[in-house]
Image: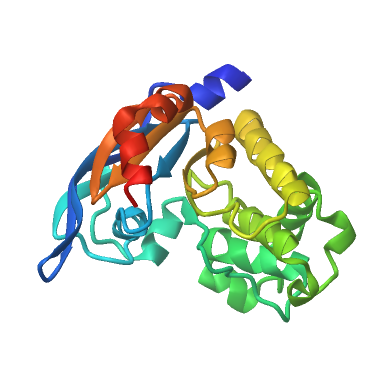
Amino acid sequence: MSAQASKQGTGKTVLQVNDLAKSFGGVHAVRGVTFEVKEGEILGLIGPNGSGKSTLFNCILGQLPPTRGDVMVDGKSVTGLRPSDLNLLGIGRTFQLLQVFPQLTVRENLILAGQEHKGSRLKRLFGAGDAGLTGDAERMIDFFRLGHLKDEKAGGLSYGQQKLLDCAMAFMAGPRLVLLDEPAGGVNLTMLANLKERLQAINKETGATFVVIEHNMEFVMSLCTRILVLAEGQIIAEGSPDTVRKDPKVIEAYLGH
């Protein structure tokens, strides 16, 4: 797949969100959001604090039941499925709060991340202790340039290195779709450039499809080819980074908060 085809998407819809809404009592956090993500696309989701981004992610990923609406992956409804069920369908995610295991090495973290996808329960009970995933882990370590750290405990890594490991864990099983929740948060500029370059590379080389929630505007605008802007639970703008950056509704939403 060429870089251009990968970044723009192939035309096949991987994720479709239809009229999704979530209310907490009288508070309408998400108000009828509809969008789709094409195979191989890197889609950015931005918006001011309190705009509903995390609630929307959590409804898509089964952590919260939507009040109404439907979530479809490859044309099949996955609304209401548990996160573990979505993992088996090839949907991964990262969280704002790191999900690495500090007492395990980098390699062990990756093996553990892959077991839920590729290591069956019987394999874990009766097969090799790594569920046959050491080779995959080594390839992911090389891809994310973590080779010098692979035997280090994750708790001893810098925050930026842990973020890189967290992303590697999300891609460990070659997922269909990954949702990244603020991957740039708290990462220094050098590590941030490395993270962006690796995400672009995995998109180009494997056609990986992902959606990124991010507050770092420079990062998301340079990584993504299409941006959705959420404000007060609704999509107020959609388009290329240049189009969105100049949109008066977007400028007002950010300056007004």
Report whether 245 appears left or right of 118: left
**What residue sits 35% from the left and 39% below the top?**
229
Quadrant the N terminus occupies: top right
**What residue sits 49% from the left and 49% below the top?**
214
Report whether 74 appears left or right of 245: left
Q: Is residue 197 above or below residue 245?
A: below
Q: Nearer the viewer, residue 98 or 65?
A: 98
State the image coordinates of residue 138 (x, y, percent, origin top left): 79, 54
List the single residue furthest toward the right.
Answer: 148
Q: Using the rendered image of the protein, determine whether residue 46 is visible from the camera's viewpoint.
A: yes
**What residue sits 61% from the left and 34% below the top?**
206
Q: Nearer the viewer, residue 119 or 182?
A: 182
| Colouring scheme, one of rainbow, by chain, secondary structure, one colour | rainbow
State the image coordinates of residue 198 (x, y, percent, origin top left): 70, 41
Q: How many marks?
A: 0
State the image coordinates of residue 245 (x, y, percent, origin top left): 44, 29
State the image coordinates of residue 3 (x, y, percent, origin top left): 62, 21
List the single residue furthest toward the front.
Answer: 255
List the single residue furthest toward the bottom.
Answer: 103
Q: Using the rendered image of the protein, determine whether residue 131 is visible from the camera's viewpoint.
A: no
